[in-house]
Image (tube, grey):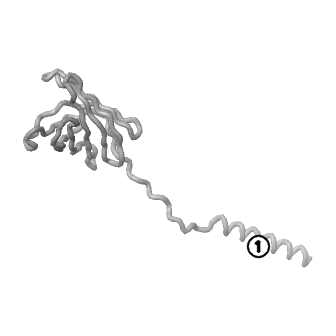
Amino acid sequence: MKKSISLILIGLACLMFMAAGCTSTSDTPPATPTAQAESWSGIWSTTWTSADHATPVPGDDITFTQTGSSVTGTYVNPEHDFTGSITGTVEGNTLTGTWSESGLPETSGTFEFVLSDDGNTFTGTWKSANDESDATYSWNGVRT
């Protein structure tokens, strides 16, 4: 009888020990989810500055398409008969890349856009590859 009680007590002790291991808390806090940046996909009405660096010029509507961290975009300027294309990469809320325009000789450059917290506007800058002064101009947009 004593042997049976001893075996039962040992078995219960083992079960309690195993259960304690299953329910122990970890010292590692749970991972905090990071905020997902808004998508750049959509149509954006833009303005930019040019030679005088001060006067905003109504820009063309840009249509962005985002796949993962890659963004492509197109715009058409019927008034001056050219089309533009944009290729960039998103990191956080910042889109950086290159732009180019067909119909205008040697017109290309770089840009950096920063998306607002609500995902409905961006502020940014652009440079022209053939601008010897290496000037930086503004280029901003509003989601339509």
Q: Position of residue 127 (x, y in %)?
A: 21, 40
* Quarter containing the C terminus: top left
Residue 119, picture quadrant: top left
Query: Label 1: which residue?
Result: 13
So how many labels did they put on this image?
1
Query: In the rendered view, does 69 fall on the left or right side of 141?
Result: right
* Quarter containing the N terminus: bottom right
- Residue 22 can be seen, yes or no: yes
Is 122 placed above or below 9 here? above
Observer-nearest of 138 and 22: 138
Observer-nearest of 105 and 47: 105
Residue projecting furthest to the front? 132
Is 61 placed above or below 40 here? above
Q: Where is residue 39 in the image (x, y as percent from the top left)?
A: 34, 40
Is 100 placed above or below 3 here? above
Residue 45, picture quadrant: top left
- Residue 144 can be seen, yes or no: no
Query: In the rendered view, does 86 fall on the left or right side of 13?
Result: left
Residue at the location (86% across, 76% down)? 6
Residue at the location (41% across, 53% down)? 34
- Mark 1 is surrounded, within 10 Å at the Cα level, by few (under 14), some (14 to 19) or many (20 or more) other residues, namely few
Observer-nearest of 138 and 44: 138
